[in-house]
């Protein structure tokens, strides 16, 4: 809603020691076009009882806003809380006609004032520990830049606003709200190593410990998954070379055999 209030003041209303509200404020809903018309809201006169050519009239136009936080945000919308003052001076052309002159004058689109609200977005990052219990504490770093200001956050499993338990069917969920739509948020997590387990870390199915989400009206979502497999593994490779002196290796058939053995000491000396 947009509200218009007519005021008479001795000077600029923001500095006036006294303001006289000349008429009840007019409030109108904002239509889909975004244009609110306040038509013929005041009538000026000059006669033996009244002379509106003396002094100035002021009109305050402002948006009717709900209770906002310290950043002028409510339910994902950042409101324009500015107060727009328009001064009206009434002049007499000497032929019985009064003219109301606005200052500032309307722009090229015949608009006197403009209010700009911003729909904000958010991102949700999730964390799953698959194959092992979640640790008592765990962190994901988040960073993003709005204008020239860079913000760095540490998302912790101990945060008051985190939900979930870290299980596949109940992941930890953090939501970063009130971001300009299109803001890219980069996340970095360190993974979690557990003795005796192989661990793989993925973000949205891609191997790695970093990921990005772009803020949208309906929160963009992404999930980090640590998968644990019990039992450490290792691999070894060998190469053997066969030399056939004065012979042609391509003619006869030679074979090399490898046998894996576990022994209590050197196999040549082992009793078993």
Image (cartoon, rainbow, N blue to C red):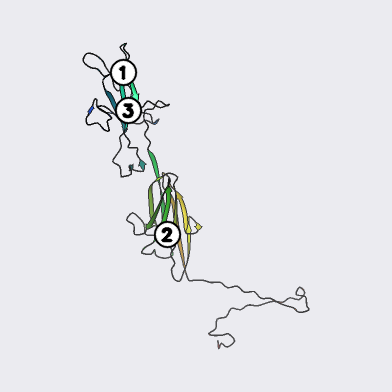
* Of marks 1 and 2, the one in the foreground: 1
For mark 1, what is the residue?
A: 91
What residue sits right under mark 3 in the picture? 86
Q: Earlier in the sequence, mark 3 or mark 2?
A: 3
Secondary structure beneath disc 3?
A: strand
**What secondary structure is marked by label 1?**
strand
Left or right of 262: which side holds 213?
Answer: left
- Up the image or down, 131 lies above or below 118; here it is below
- What's the mark number on residue 220? none
Determine crowd level at label 2: few under 14, some 14-19, many 20+ residues with C-alpha closer than 10 A: many
Give the image location of residue 113, x and y in percent: 36, 30
Mark 3 and mark 2: span between their CA atoms?
Answer: 57 Å
**Residue 89 drawn at (x, y percent):** 31, 22
Task: Please give the residue where the numbered disc 2 appears in the rendered image.
Answer: 128
Q: Position of residue 263 (x, y in %)?
A: 55, 83
Q: Is residue 149 positioned above or below 112 on the image?
A: below
């Amino acid at each position: 809603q947009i509200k218009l209030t007519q005021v008479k003041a001795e000077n600029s209303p923001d500095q006036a020691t006294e303001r006289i509200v000349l008429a009840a404020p007019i409030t109108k809903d904002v239509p889909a076009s975004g244009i609110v018309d306040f038509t013929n809201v005041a009538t000026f006169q000059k006669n033996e009882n009244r002379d509106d050519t003396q002094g100035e009239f002021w009109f305050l136009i402002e948006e009717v806003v709900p209770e906002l936080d310290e950043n002028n945000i409510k339910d994902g919308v950042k409101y324009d809380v500015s107060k727009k003052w328009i001064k009206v001076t009434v002049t007499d052309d000497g032929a019985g006609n009064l003219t109301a002159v606005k200052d500032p004058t309307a722009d090229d689109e015949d608009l006197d004032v403009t209010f700009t609200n911003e729909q904000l977005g958010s991102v949700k990052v999730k964390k799953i520990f698959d194959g092992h219990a979640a640790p008592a504490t765990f962190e994901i770093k988040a960073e993003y830049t709005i204008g020239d200001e860079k913000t760095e956050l540490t998302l912790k499993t101990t945060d008051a606003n985190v939900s979930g338990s870290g299980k596949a069917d109940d992941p930890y969920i953090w939501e970063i709200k009130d971001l300009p739509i299109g803001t890219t948020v980069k996340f970095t997590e360190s993974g979690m190593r557990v003795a005796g387990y192989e661990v793989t870390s993925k973000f949205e199915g891609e191997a790695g410990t970093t990921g990005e989400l772009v803020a949208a009206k309906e929160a963009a979502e992404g999930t980090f998954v640590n998968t644990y497999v019990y039992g450490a593994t290792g691999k070894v490779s060998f190469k053997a070379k066969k030399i056939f002196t004065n012979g042609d290796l391509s003619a006869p058939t030679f074979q090399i055999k490898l046998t894996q053995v576990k022994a209590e000491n050197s196999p040549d000396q082992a009793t078993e």
